[in-house]
Amino acid sequence: MNGHKPNNIVSMETTSSTAPPSPPRVRGMLDSLIEYCHILEGSQAFANVGISANHFIHRLLTLQSCLRDNDRDPQQHCCSKVMDLSYDLETLFEDIELQQHVGSSYSSDPPFWSQLLATQHKLVHQGSSSTLYGTSQRLASMLKLLDQFVNEIKPFACSLPLPKTQIHVIVQKPQIGYNYHGLKQLIDENESPSSSVGFDDNHGCVLRYLDLSNNPLKELPDSLTNLLRLQTLKILQTYIKSLPKNLYKMVNLRHVCTDSGMCFESVPPYIGRLVSLQTFKDFVVNRQNGCKIIELKDLNNLRGKLCIRQLENVTSCDEAQQARLYLKKHLTWLRLCWSESDILDVDVNFDVIEFLQPHHNLQLLEIYGYLNSTFPRWISDTSFKNLSSITLEECVCEQLPEFGVLPSLRSLRISVVTGVNDIYESFYGHGKVKVGFPSLCTLYVSFMLDLETWFGFANGDLPKLEKLHIISCPELKHLPEMKNLSMLNELVIEECTKLNSLPKNGLPGNVKLLRIHHCPDLAKKCRRKVGTEWKKIAHIPSIDV
């Protein structure tokens, strides 16, 4: 190929029928993996899994060279395995991201990798089945398997000629199209490169990987569905708000990769036919046929994160039940969202969420906009042994769930929840477990505008709580007793205007930081040396009142 290859955002290939193509996804995977390896090279990551960083990177570069030098059948089986493994690797790093999300507020914690590696040896001897240990073992397994695959493919390196009919098609940033001598241009020249792209039928026979990320694209053409063998579509950092209406024809599609914050205006109809789909983060429920929540029924290969929005469009518990979320065992992060709407039905809301119970492998749960007096029973089911983070936001209810019974819950955020006047002992799981919130490290309670009373923690509850933030609870008159929170090191109280005292028995001796803002009566009593509450906080090194 003539000309200099630019820093491309997507590399694809098409070939004649005489030479089956190697999956181009492998090359992109290798680039990303090599980058990760260089980042981790200075750490103990590779040493702890028994592999030299330089050795492994060299192996990856060898495999990369092999894939560029030949494109014949002997390597197809290996390439396919490596490609599948690459998606496993991406899932691994999503798990790492999730762990960082759960622990992101711990200023005293080491980075995730350091924490993982520092605890691995200990976990092995304890026989622990924790998430950290499992993640470490998966990393070790994948690295060694990749090394094995390199050895399998090495005999074919540089021994097979590159077919002359092979065409590399490149979409470059910021110019979507890029002209080379002898190249078939991917972009429809009648379209503006800043808004759209086009595909003809010739690409559909072989193209498996398409990355259109980091471009000012606003829409995808219907011609995208000509790519019938496409497995991966990446549209990170774009302005795309919808997908082609005939997406259901792309039955080989496995991954639609979008930014975490990207929200589609709608989801194309009959997406439930894409039963191989593994990555699809944003599902928007509609009442039209083909766009209802039932489309999730057979998408049991979905993994990682899934956000289901506009749940007010689910009209019955039968519809919700047919989504069969309980069968989606690869989902680790679930977000359920109701929008502000005139069609909200409080009773239907409860029936819907009751039948949206996820698989017990779930690790992170977020609920937005839920409206009912109570939450479903499953949300505080002890069988959710991996559930480590829960967020409730913009909900209306009368009583909080019994979150204290969840054995692995580390982070709990309750924000803009109205209708709750009291936090009772049931919140801690009293009567059901001996110790409430045995793993909780951070508790954030904010904008609970109706909260008046917060009953105290029993002796032994929250043994690992490190951070407690209470913000914008204007009706709260008293704080719960917290003298027994031996691990508490940060207490933040803001905009609780009716608070005028600290807990009767004072604060734990381990508190290192106390911040009290916009609580005029309490702040006055906590003035240094002269306030009536000063003796309760004099031992704290950092006080901001």
Image: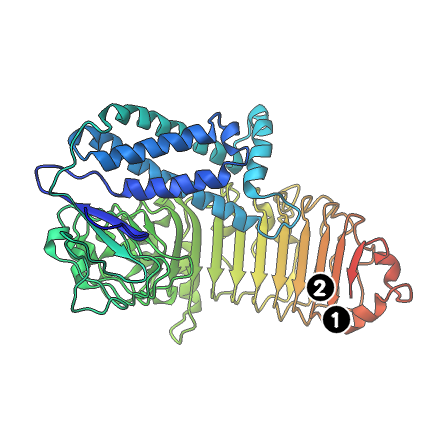
Q: Quadrant of the C terminus?
A: bottom right
Callout 2: SS: strand
Q: CA distance from mark 1 to mark 2?
A: 8 Å
* Residue 150 image point, x, y percent: 32, 28
* Residue 488 image point, x, y percent: 72, 49
Residue 209 seen in this snapshot: no
Name the residue located 67 percent from the left edge and 59 percent from the top edge.
469
Name the residue located 42 percent from the left edge and 57 percent from the top edge.
260
Q: Which residue is mark 1?
A: 519
Name the residue located 75 percent from the left edge and 69 percent from the top edge.
499
Seen from the viewer's position, the closer of residues 149 and 467 is 149
Say whether residue 56 is left or right of residue 14.
Answer: right
Where 330 falls versus 217 (above or below)? above
Marks 1,2: beta carbons within 8 A: yes
What's under tag 2, amino acid-wise? Ile
Seen from the viewer's position, the closer of residues 181 and 9 is 181
Where 12 falls versus 266 (above or below)? above
What's under tag 1, amino acid-wise? Cys
Q: Which residue is mark 2?
A: 493
Say whether residue 540 is left or right of residue 441.
Answer: right
Residue 239 seen in this snapshot: yes
